[in-house]
Amino acid sequence: MRQVSRSPLHTPFDTIIIGSGFGGTMVAHELVNAGERVLLIERGDWVTRGPENWQAEGVGLRSPHYSRDALYDVSTDYGRSEAGFFACVGGQSVFYGGASLRLREGDFTADAEIVGDSDAEWPYDYAALEPHYARAERLLRVAGAAGRDPTEGFRSTAYVQKPNPLAPISRRIEGAALRLGLTPFRLPLAIANQTDDGEGCILCRTCDGYACAVDAKNDLATRVLPDLLAKGLHIEVNTVAVRLATRGTRITSVECVNRTTGERVRLSARRFVLAGGALASPHLLLASDLARLNPGGGVVGRYLMRHDNAVVFGIFRQRPNPERVFDKQIAIHDYYFGHPTIRTPAGKLGGLQQLTPPQDLVRAHLGGALGAMAGYGVGFMTGILCIAEDQPRVDNHVSLDPFVRDRFGVPRLRVHHRYSRRDGAARSALIRKGRELLREAGALVTAVHPIDTFSHAVGTVRMGVDPRRSALDGHCQFRGVDNLWVVDGSFMPRSGGVNPSLTIAANALRVGAHLAATGDAAGDARSPRAAAVASR
């Protein structure tokens, strides 16, 4: 575990941030660098780094950092189940695959085929977020190659790093795409390239879904938080926020429970930033009965989106990646806004991305002789991830269970989600194109695996223009509460067709800069250094 000096909890803080993922960490980056006293509360702990991360038990869903101490009751198209969530310093960034894509310029304008009657509306456009995308890419040291993506928007800066050379199977996928008349491009990745002294990515295949054993993945716990700690950020780990207390229209404190000792404590600040994720944030808001203060309170917990994702696997006669090197490198956006060869559905679809089959995970999950055989078979596969943009639908929501409480005393969260017919049609269209691509690359047969996780969950506390139809304003302030902001993926009014992490990071930098410059809505005094920064 990384050693962190913990502050006395009676320290007067300017801002308390709940959650250390992309939203919480990037807001902290702006406020700490403006001289504010910031406390970041994290439900989980630091993830150790070393050879254990390369083992099958190191994959996120099997690690102790996938929390099961307050399981959600989940109902989806795939049935009813219980689900945990990632709880660690850096949030899901520690276990993600590093894909760092901007939303397209067209994602910020309404597509009637997607929006329907949801009134989902971005209160700003791509140009307003572009400088913050550039800053997020610099902070995460994203490696990419601009100019090849046919849907790429305006860029004010180049990528910080050039991508690593293509693996042989990636060159094979790229060649197949070109023969099909497509425009493959390099998937932007927040991964440190190997340097002349040997540091950086060693091109292993335990990346997507694993914590990086050599700190080459530029996740938040590796790349951003250590610098903030050196500048005065305080982090309380294993600390569960269970209720936000109010007086009038202000949050006065957050009640927390220590996961290890069960000790309860109330923490106060003049400003609160909620960044728990698209499931945890509405959970806390509903448990704190804050929707009643919001003119758009009826949308809190609603319009849950998570992309309609599936992986198409191609099975080859010979191992497509015998070198067993990192091969999550190619993306295709020719179908993003629709395509002449796709008649239905009309409008936007989404993207295709190369994906590494989880050989070691399959072997460990099945175990024994069956696991060994299946793991061997995975070695003859390569994958294409199909990311279909899903519609914001009011019926997809989270709510509180009136009868069951978790061990921290919070009502259990119920999650209800169903894909629309259009969502399924968009995914099916992308799957067909993924199959074509793999067959052109030499696959003998293909197989499809639907993804039923909430790794791309967004939308449950959405921002917007109409106060009656959106819980957050254009700077992510929670309407009706003077000193509360929400900056995780729940802020997004639509999901787009790319991984949401970079958009969450960029928006949080935007919100953090706004808070550092203006203070909170009630005009409380800022710290002297923050005021000095704002006056420059």
Image (cartoon, helix red, strand yellow):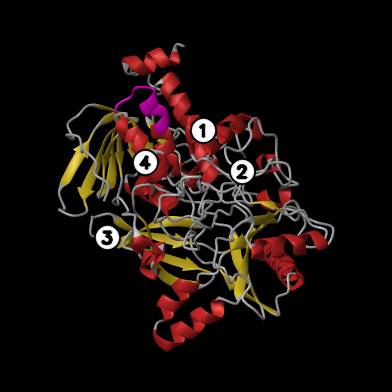
Q: Amino acid at mark 2?
A: Lys
Sequence-wise first label, 4 or 1: 4
Sequence-wise first label, 3 or 4: 4
CB atoms of marks 1 and 2 within 8 Å: no
Magenta region includes residue 36? yes
Please name the residue that numbered disc 1 is placed on: 473
Element marked by disc 4: loop
Q: Residues within 10 Å of mark 4 (few under 14, many from 20)?
A: many
Please name the residue that numbered disc 2 is placed on: 162
Magenta stretch, residue numbers: 29-37
Which residue is painted at 31% across and 54% down in the image? 48
Element marked by disc 1: loop
Question: Where in the figure is residue 465, as x and y percent of width and height?
Answer: 58, 34
Q: Residues within 10 Å of mark 1 (few under 14, many from 20)?
A: some
Element marked by disc 3: strand
Q: Nearer the viewer, mark 2 or mark 3?
A: 2
Q: Amino acid at mark 3?
A: Arg
The circle drawn on residue 405 is: 3
